[in-house]
Image (cartoon, rainbow, N blue to C red):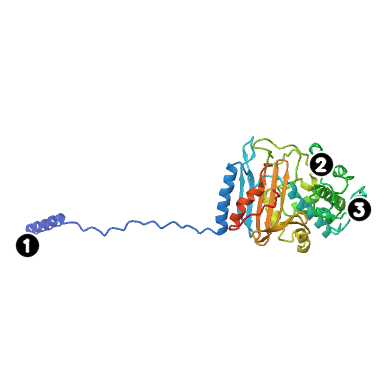
Amino acid sequence: MPKAPEFLIVLALVLLVSACASPVRPTPTPAWTPTPAFTPTLTADEQSAIQIEAALTALNEKNLFSGSVLIARDGHILLSQGYGLADIEQQIPNTPQTKFRIGSVTKQFTATAILILQHQGKLKVKDPICKYIDNCPAAWQRITIHHLLTHTSGIYNITNSVDYLNFKKRTLSPDQIIDLFRDLPLDFNPGERWSYSNSGYILLGAIIEKASGRPFASFLQQNILDPLQMKDSGYDESRPTIQNHGVGYKGATAEADYIDMSIPFSAGALYSTVADLYKWDQALYTEKLLPAAERDQAFLPYVQMSGLISYGYGWMIGKQFDQTWIMHAGGIDGFVSIINRFPDSQTTIILLSNHENTNLGAVMTTIAPMLFGGGTWINPGFS
């Protein structure tokens, strides 16, 4: 056994040798490799919505579209967006909640009100209109409510009058408006052909008031707008103070001519939003307002308008992209509108614009093929 001093010397030498030896290095941990980001696969509808949004943005930048759009399919909203300004002076943008005058899109609500009254047993579409019109002229004796609904009455269209630009600024009662065309001769015999007549739909408003005992606006509110919770829709004001109401323009920046909203009455006096009109569209697949058989009377092609489309009750019916196409357009000072329904695929395209010169037919020509995977939009000439 070594002595203690020798043991300490040996131990010191061992430690010195160990310190000079190459250290044992741990095995390095591999560098971190990030997991590739998950990229979801877009559906065809989502891809279409992206294309359409880009196209509408481009149209807006070229001053070819200012307004709001809603596109939906099978109960799912694909695009709900505003473009341009609702008020140029105040720099307020258009949104899906912006309120627009919808012009003749009003007619489908008027027609539905007639069908509701028929369901209530208060009238029949085959009734002669003289049953409900005071001081009914002899020339109107053969005209039925059905003729008014389908624009086949032969009654002169009051908005074609040379005096229209003057009296559209006046506040008139329905009877006073009717007096403006009451004694004019018929353009043709009732049922003989089709000719668009705002006068006919003004008469329908008067009939609704007579049969229901209530003002037209009140009847629509209680029987259509309230049940569907269309809280951003109603009978418009002549000088609107309604919150979020868009300003109507007739040029790039010039405000549209004034019109007293008593004049379009039941032919075109409503305002709405794309969001509310979508509620309306969806309700038409249900029986919230009417039993299916009575509701669908509005969508029957009663009379041929052109080679492409027929007219129902407040709706135009035809074919686009090999699908049934139900639509109506509207135009009133400062605003244009269109609602397109494709019930075969439950597809909806709603466009509302606050520039009266906007060509919504051209907008549909651009965006509709993107939604239907190609093909050509056939413009019927109603924009």
Mark 2–mark 3 Cα distance, whole angstroms, equals 23 Å
From the viewer's side, name the closer residue of 91 and 71: 71
- The residue under label 3 is 141
Q: Amino acid at mark 2?
A: Ser
Pointers 1 and 3 in contact (C-beta within 8 Å): no
* Of marks 1 and 2, the one in the foreground: 2
Which label is found at residue 129? none
| Residue 257 falls in image quadrant | top right
Q: Amino acid at mark 1?
A: Pro
Pointers 2 and 3 in contact (C-beta within 8 Å): no
* Of marks 1 and 3, the one in the foreground: 3
Which label is found at residue 161? 2
| Residue 62 falls in image quadrant | top right
From the viewer's side, name the closer residue of 26 and 299: 299
Label 1 or label 2, whichever comes before in sequence order: 1
**Residue 33 percent coordinates (x, y):** 36, 57
* Of marks 2 and 3, the one in the foreground: 2
- The residue under label 1 is 2
Q: On screen, 100 above or below 279?
A: above
Q: Amino acid at mark 3?
A: Gln
Q: Dot 3: within a 10 Å radius of its alpha carbon, few (fewer than 14), some, or many (20 or more) residues? A: few
Q: In the structure shown, which secondary structural element does the residue marked by tag 2 occupy?
A: loop
Compared across the picture, whether 69 is left or right of 177 comes to left
Q: In the structure shown, which secondary structural element does the residue marked by tag 3 occupy?
A: loop
Q: In the structure shown, which secondary structural element does the residue marked by tag 1 occupy?
A: loop
Instruction: Count the marks.
Output: 3
Label 2 or label 3, whichever comes before in sequence order: 3
